[in-house]
Amino acid sequence: MSFSRRSLLVTAGTALAATATHGLAFAAPAAGADPRMATRELGDPNAKLVVEEWFSLTCIHCAHFSENTFPLVKKNLIDTGKIRYVFHDFPTDQLATVAAMVARTLPPERYEPFTASLLASLDRWAYVRDSSPLEALKKMAAFAGMPADVFDKTVADQQLMQFILSQQTEAQDKYHFDSTPTFRFNNKVQISNDMTYEAFTKALADAS
């Protein structure tokens, strides 16, 4: 999914969060001590091969990869200790930004299962027609164990939002991509496209 209006995303995302949680007031965690801003990854931390994925939680191409290719990557490459897999939020719209904030607020071990759940059910929350996507996301978060008041505080958290957006900007400026999903294999091979498992393993071999 392409993305080019970064300034619009920042403005729209901020507006959405402020509107959704009007009237809430709470203290943001101290900078540098917030576990929500820690790296989200799977696999052996000492693996010689590292794969990074930048994805958006409303991206249909990311959803296709998550549902069709990632399970094989996890089974054959991550769980066997062959690669370390690093997730990076790269929201392509304001709803994806809020969803990333919610995912990062859950306990770290729930991050990957929750994001996979969101990507597998885009039609039930991100692209619903007769109800609010934000309310649908709130229900999804509740199923994952997030109380309603925590959800409301999370989507109003400007510090967390700015962290995600700044990380996105940094990646965009450093690696010069503007679509999701984008993968970097061992910091050598970069591909911006949904991939089959065969294409994934070929890129990994090329970067080894």
Image: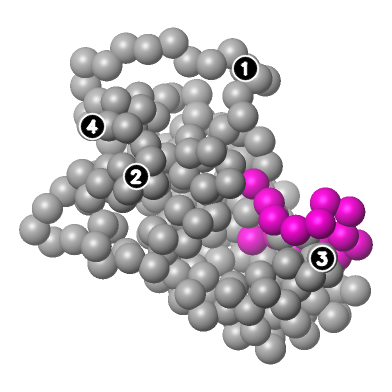
Q: Is disc 1 in contact with disc 3, using a CB cutoff of under 8 Å?
A: no
Q: Residue at x 89, y 54 (%)?
A: 46
- Residue bearing mark 3: 81
Label 1, label 3: how many angstroms apart (C-alpha)?
Answer: 33 Å
Camera-side residue: 183 or 105? Answer: 105
Left or right relative to 46: residue 150: left
Mark 4 or mark 1, earlier in chain: 4
Circle 2 residues within 10 Å: few <14, some 14–19, many ≥20? many
Q: Residue at x 69, y 88 (%)?
A: 198
- Residue bearing mark 1: 31
Q: In front: mark 2 or mark 1?
A: 2
Q: Secondary structure at mark 4?
A: helix
At label 1, which amino acid type do we have?
Ala
Left or right relative to 1: residue 122: left
> Where is residue 91 drawn, in percent x and y?
47, 51
Query: How did the renderer colour the structure?
Result: one colour
Label 2, label 1: how many angstroms apart (C-alpha)?
Answer: 25 Å
Q: In front: mark 3 or mark 4?
A: 3
